[in-house]
Image (cartoon, helix red, strand yellow):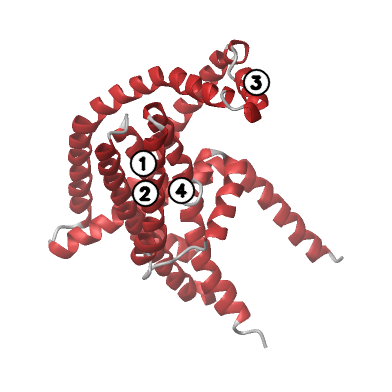
Amino acid sequence: MNARTLLVALTLVMLALLTWQLRWVLLVLFGAVVLAVALDVLIEKLQKRTSLPRPLSLAVVLLVLLIVGGVVFQLLVPELITQVQELGNLVPTVIEKLKSMLSSNPRLINLEESFTQQFSWERIQPLGSQLLGFAGGAANSLIQLLLMSLLAVLLALDPGSHRQMVIAVTPRPARQAMDELLNKCRMALGGWLTGMTISASTVFVLTWAGLALLKVPLALLSALLCGLLTFVPTIGPTAATLLPLSLALLTSPVLMLQVLVLRLILQNLEAFVLTPLLLSRTVNLLPTVALMAQLSLGALLGLPGVLLALPLVVVLQVGMEQVVVKQIMDRWA
């Protein structure tokens, strides 16, 4: 091994260590880029219909988002607060219902004893200190979210200058390729965000309507959770189904079966019809790639990693196609 190879290896190791130490900064930066792209999609649509300059268009978009958010807050949040309080009161009832179902079946008596031990008072008492730690983590996450939003607004205000900065630090022979790569990443990420937003909104409305027709308790809270977790494919919809199933169990096993059928129909409609149709012109992620990305970033970075796994995979997939496939593999003699 010569000195040059050793120097390159040490440089790569130092860069890897520096990236790991700055992982939360990079995560906030990437989250800001995702939010900036979402704002940019709205700004471009507004500018196509008007002749407003970009700063004024950004101000109009932010004002509209604030108004819509305020209206949604006034309409939904009071009902959500009430339903969250009801959920807290229903949790002991759900636990007792499950214990009675397990104890009524002799084959599940061992499982019932284990269930009773897991939810004993001795095990619940240490949750107080854990909740304090959770509150501290939530405050830290709120600060990161505010910083992410501020960076997103600054990026959306003048994306051209930031784009030119990235191109300027690229070696001259690769600048045209970098410009094309940034264009394709922007289109793929913007299309993915638009498609997933429409898909999640549709799932929320249909789930709310279906649960309300079935008269399932806390229909709005369950539907909101199902809609939000649509942004976490594979894992999210399955986890979101547990809440309405548990609440339907309080009424009757028949209602629980009806809720399960409803959620299966909506999940398959979203996964195999709606999402592929909306993302057909942008990028379509393989379920295996999406799941592995969520598991990997979730293990490394927790919940923020899970939430930003798919936007990152969208960007990496475009990068692999443009750089690895076209520039290396296709030119391999």
Q: Is residue 56 visible?
A: yes
Amino acid type shown at disc 2: Leu
Q: Residue furthest bottom?
A: 333
Q: How many marks?
A: 4
State whether residue 193 is above or below residue 143: below
Q: Earlier along the polypeptide chain: callout 3 or callout 1?
A: 3
Q: Residue furthest left?
A: 50
Quarter of the N terminus within the rendering: bottom right
Which residue is at a point 58% across and 11% down the rendered structure image?
Answer: 121
Q: Nearer the viewer, mark 4 or mark 1?
A: 4
Q: Residue 253's spot in the image, x, y percent?
A: 42, 34
Q: For mark 4, give the secondary structure.
A: loop
Quarter of the C terminus within the rendering: bottom right
Amino acid type shown at disc 4: Val
Q: Which residue is mark 4?
A: 232
Amino acid type shown at disc 3: Glu
Amino acid type shown at disc 1: Ser
Q: Nearer the viewer, mark 3 or mark 1?
A: 3
Q: Residue 148's spot in the image, x, y percent?
A: 41, 41
Q: For mark 2, give the secondary structure.
A: helix
Q: Give the camera-side residue of 292 and 44.
A: 292
Q: Which residue is mark 3?
A: 113
Which residue is at a point 59% across and 54% down the rendered structure image?
Answer: 292
What's the distance in space between the residues labelled 2 and 4, CA to CA? 17 Å
Q: Residue 161's spot in the image, x, y percent?
A: 36, 59
Q: Quadrant of residue 320?
A: bottom right
Disc 2 crowd, CA 10 A, few/some/many (<14, 14-19, 20+): many
Q: Which mark is residue 35?
A: 2
Q: Which residue is mark 1?
A: 149
Which residue is at a point 54% across and 13% down the rendered structure image?
Answer: 128
Q: Residue 43's spot in the image, x, y percent?
A: 24, 56
Q: Earlier along the polypeptide chain: callout 2 or callout 3?
A: 2
